[in-house]
Image (cartoon, helix red, strand yellow):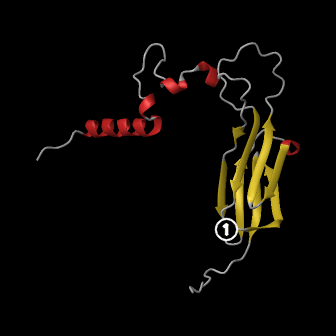
């Protein structure tokens, strides 16, 4: 019985993933002109369009306890006054701005990995909550929004007619 080469399996998986994510039109071979970037991503106008500045997306953790639904988000460097937290139709929205401070004297960046500017996140809450019983706390750079869950019958029998 012949054994398959493990490397061949990995190559097949990579090709399948490439095809799945890039589609047939974007599987062009890398060239010196595009430095290995697929054709759909090599257009500088798409990447450098100053008119299309999008807010960063805030990373969150959402979990529940027996009585509460909790949303946590890292918001280090954001003042309370720069946060906008709201709820509508069981959807929590968090918006804010991360300020880099005074950068007038900066002549050249060698590395710039931190995100500065506006961010936002809207989360459809996975369980019904009491919108009048919400607690939001900003402590040590972590925003914690806690909701009281609405009690629901675990099983509701529906009669079929």
Q: Seen from this angle, which residue lies furthest front?
A: 161
Crowd tier of the residue under label 1, counting other residues whose Cα lies within 10 Å: few below 14, some 14–19, many 20 or above: few
The residue that mark 1 highlights is: 65
Q: Secondary structure at mark 1?
A: loop
Residue 17 position within the rendered picture, expressed as x and y whole percent measured from the top left: 41, 39
Query: Between residues 36 and 80, which one lies in front from this camera angle?
Result: 36
**Which quadrant would residue 132 be assigned to in this image?**
bottom right
For residue 30, side relative to residue 153 (left or right) = left
Quadrant holding the C terminus: bottom right
Residue 15 position within the rendered picture, expressed as x and y whole percent measured from the top left: 36, 35
Query: Between residues 100 and 44, which one lies in front from this camera angle?
Result: 44
- Residue at the location (46% across, 38% down)? 21
- Residue at the location (82% across, 61% down)? 135
- Residue at the location (66% across, 21% down)? 48
Query: Between residues 42 and 73, which one lies in front from this camera angle?
Result: 42
Q: Seen from this angle, which residue lies furthest right?
A: 81
Residue 85 position within the rendered picture, expressed as x and y whole percent measured from the top left: 81, 51
């Amino acid at each position: 019985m012949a054994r398959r080469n493990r490397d061949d399996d990995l190559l097949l998986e990579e090709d399948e993933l490439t095809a799945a994510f890039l589609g047939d039109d974007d599987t062009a071979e890398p060239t010196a002109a595009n430095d290995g970037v697929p054709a759909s991503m090599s257009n500088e106008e798409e990447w450098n369009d100053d008119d299309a500045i999008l807010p960063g997306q805030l990373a969150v953790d959402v979990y529940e306890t027996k009585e509460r639904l909790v949303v946590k988000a890292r918001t280090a460097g954001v003042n309370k006054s720069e946060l906008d937290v709201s709820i509508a139709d069981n959807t929590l929205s968090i918006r804010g701005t991360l300020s880099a401070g005074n950068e007038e004297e900066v002549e050249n960046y060698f590395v710039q990995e931190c995100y500065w500017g506006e961010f936002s996140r809207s989360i459809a809450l996975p369980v019904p909550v009491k919108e009048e019983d919400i607690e939001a706390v900003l402590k040590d750079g972590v925003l914690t929004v806690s909701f009281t869950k609405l009690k629901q019958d675990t099983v509701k029998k529906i009669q079929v007619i």
